[in-house]
Image (cartoon, helix red, strand yellow):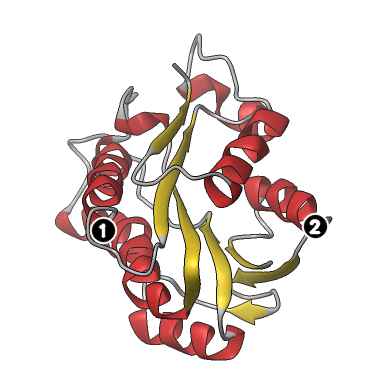
Amino acid sequence: MKILIIGGNGTIGKKVTAHFKNEAEVLVAGRTSGDVTVDIANSTSIKKMFTKTGKLDAIIAIAGEAKWDTFANLTEEDYHIGLNSKLMGQVNLVRIGQNYVNKNGSITLTTGILADDPVVKTTSAAMVNGAIHSFVMAVALEIENGIRVNAVSANVVEDAYEKYKDFFPGNMPTPMNKLVGAYVRSVKGKRNGEIIRLYN
């Protein structure tokens, strides 16, 4: 199995990459480092990345930005950070990436609890996560060649809990091994068009 992990050097990505390297050929893509580089907010950059990777059995996207600020402070430009990066970045990874995924392969996107349980200063991030959930459910009805598309949506994760705990009072962090398991379920299981929630 050949897997591309976009954001494979990040907090979540490092753990997911380490797991899959035990059983598959793994390529890591990052903005400035990795086996290949990519700016997911730029569709031309995404196309160049896939030209370099060639055919794949699975794509895992653990990347994308969105602006955190109070609703009163958010400008139109602030919203476009999340729209261009986390939302359209992941949409374009599916739109372009489907041509590089082998038959019966999979594409896994990443969102988060804010889609269902937002906190203050997350109007933009919550909006984007919710849009990705809707996209995943809809695109699964139409994507061809047996390709499956899912999203992993976790609570604040264990390895980032100290950094973000003040934003999520009372939230119990998602253990990293449980998080990795969700990506494994998406890649190796049969689910399609599902939001794998790790906070219910």
Tell me the SS state at disc 1: helix
Mark 1 neighbour density, 10 Å: few (under 14) some (14–19) many (20 or more): many
- On screen, residue 64 versus residue 67, left or right, reads right
CA distance for labels 1 and 2? 34 Å
Q: In the picture, which quadrant includes the N terminus? A: bottom right
Q: Is residue 21 left or right of residue 122?
A: right
Q: Write the residue at 47% across / 71% down.
A: 103
Q: Residue furthest top?
A: 170
Kind of residue indicated by mark 1: Leu
Q: Which mark is residue 83?
A: 1
Query: Which of the two discs, 1 and 2, sits closer to the camera?
Result: 2
- In this picture, residue 144 sits left or right of residue 32: left
Picture quadrant where residue 174 is located: top right
The answer to whether residue 31 is left or right of residue 159 is left
Residue 104 percent across, percent down from the top left: 48, 63
Residue that sits furthest to the right in the current view:
22
> Which residue type does callout 2 highlight?
Glu
Q: Is residue 15 depicted above or below 113 in this figure? A: below
- The residue at which mark 2 appears reads as 23
The vertical placement of 37 against 70, above or below, is below
The quarter of the image holding the C terminus is top left
Could you tell me which residue is drawn at 60 percent across and 70 percent down? 30
Nearer to us in this view, 150 or 28: 150
Residue 134 locus on image (x, y percent): 23, 44
Q: Secondary structure at mark 2?
A: loop
Name the residue nearer the viewer: 172 or 141: 141
Work out whether 114 lies above or below 32.
above
Find residue 35 and report its horizontal and vertical position in percent.
70, 78
Instruction: Name the image quarter holding residue 183.
Output: top right
